[in-house]
Image: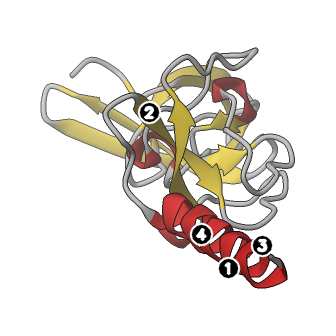
Amino acid sequence: MRIAARIARTLGAAWAVGLAAAPAAAGEQTLPVPVATIYAGDVIKPAMLREQAFPENYRPRLPVVDSTGRAVGRIARRTLLPGETIPSIAIEEARLVTRGAPTTIVFEEHGVSISTLGTALANAAVNEAVNVRNTATGRVVQGVVQPDGRVRTGQP
């Protein structure tokens, strides 16, 4: 009887390990979870996440990130624990412009381009509007953050 119980425990453990590594069954959903603790301010990389199966009727308390692609490249706003789903409000876009940091202001209109230095008055990501103080004149202008980190003002 002891041998049968030992075999049953061994098979049960093997089944549990196999279940964790197996792809999601038809009645399950897969959600990204951290492999290790991700701290606030960390940029999320693909190696930091894995897909974990959850029952079809699993309903988190808050809306969660539903795919790895939606989390990769973003910044954690708070600590994310391993094996736990990632709340949508716990991540944010990477900020290219940081409050108080110098940035380049580019005025473009009718084919004319003028550049100057300024100081960002807020954090902003790509395609977000931000106010910037022109360091030469002290005047505050509003522009849109470009993918290269510059702030563009003027008409397209």
In terms of depth relative to the viewer, which is nearer, 123 or 140? Answer: 123
- Left or right: where 111 falls relative to 104: left
Q: Earlier in the sequence, mark 2 or mark 3?
A: 3
Task: Give the alpha-carbon distance from disc 2 to disc 3, as whole Å.
Answer: 33 Å
Task: Give the alpha-carbon distance from disc 2 to disc 4, as whole Å.
Answer: 18 Å
Does residue 66 lie above or below 100 as drawn? above
Q: Are marks 1 and 3 in contact (CB under 8 Å)?
A: yes
Q: Position of residue 131 (x, y in %)?
A: 65, 24
* Residue that mark 3 sits on: 5
Q: Which mark is residue 17?
A: 4
* Residue that mark 2 sits on: 29
**Mark 1 nearby-residue class (10 Å; few <14, some 14–19, many ≥20):** few
- Left or right: where 17 falls relative to 102: left
Residue type at mark 3?
Ala
Q: Earlier in the sequence, mark 4 or mark 3?
A: 3
Task: Give the alpha-carbon distance from disc 4 to disc 1, as whole Å.
Answer: 15 Å
Question: What's the coloring here?
Answer: secondary structure
Residue type at mark 1?
Ile
